[in-house]
Image: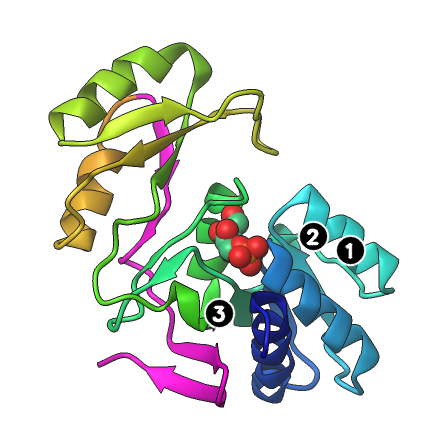
Amino acid sequence: MATQDDLKRMAAHKALELVPHGEYIGVGTGSTVKYFIEALAASAKDIKGAVSTSSSTSALLRQHGIAEVGLNEVNGLALYVDGADEINHSLQMIKGGGGALLNEKIVASASRQFVCIADESKYVARLGKFPLPVEVIEHARSLVSRQLLKLGGEPELRIGVKTDNGHQIVDVSGLNLDQPMSMEDAINHIPGVVENGIFARRPADVLVLARAGGVELVYAK
Ligand SMILES: O=C(CO)[C@H](O)[C@H](O)COP(=O)(O)O
């Protein structure tokens, strides 16, 4: 039986088919993305370079000899490839389990196409079982947490974690995410919030979904 890692690898390999030749691409963060970087390095795709979303992704790109380029050095990106913690049927996502949500949202917003790579456990009818990561300015953490409580969530500090941008992460359980875009906006309006892991304003354009029976491309309904 295929393991979750097998499925992640299958999705990552399939995504290669969507990578254009001769373009800059954005690369997300996480274990599924690690398989994508490995597959990209072993393939004949001649991308111009990759914009990274985290120090761990930069290290993997270096290790595999893929040229890294800064976002300021390119005029937009053809494609962005990343995993997700949850993705719904409109291809809206919860991201940030790996703590890279801020850079992921920035690079995704600079990309013409967002390809999400995921195993079937991530594909859900309703977002919100996975606690929502919220990146916060450290001295505003308690203030922000009180506001998150008012929005119906139960915030919990991710102990011992600092993001690549020097902030803390609060994971929020119990939020009603039936209106993901409104919640994305509401949380981002709390002073002290840097970014939150709802990707509703910038959903994926295509989901490469790996199931035990094979890999399929899913487009937003
Ligand atoms: O948002 C992310 C990192 O910030 C990842 O895409 C998400 O956590 C999924 O990770 P994985 O591929 O390891 O399951």
Alpha carbon separation for disc pair 1 and 2: 5 Å
Residue 110 in view of the camera:
yes
Horizontal side of 220 relative to 156 (left or right) equals: left
Q: Earlier in the sequence, mark 3 or mark 2?
A: 2
Could you tell me which secondary element the residue under label 2 belongs to? helix
- Give the extent of the magenta segment: 192-221
Residue that label 1 marks: 60
Numbered disc in front, either 1 or 3: 3
User: In the rendered structure, does residue 203 fall within the stretch colored magenta?
Assistant: yes
Amino acid marked by disc 2: Thr
Q: Residues within 10 Å of mark 3 (few under 14, many from 20)?
A: many
Which residue lies at the image location 49% right of the left edge and 71% below the top edge?
A: 119
Horizontal side of 204 relative to 145 (left or right) equals: right
Residue that label 2 marks: 57
Could you tell me which secondary element the residue under label 1 belongs to? helix
Q: Earlier in the sequence, mark 1 or mark 3?
A: 1
Q: Quarter of the image holding residue 63?
A: bottom right
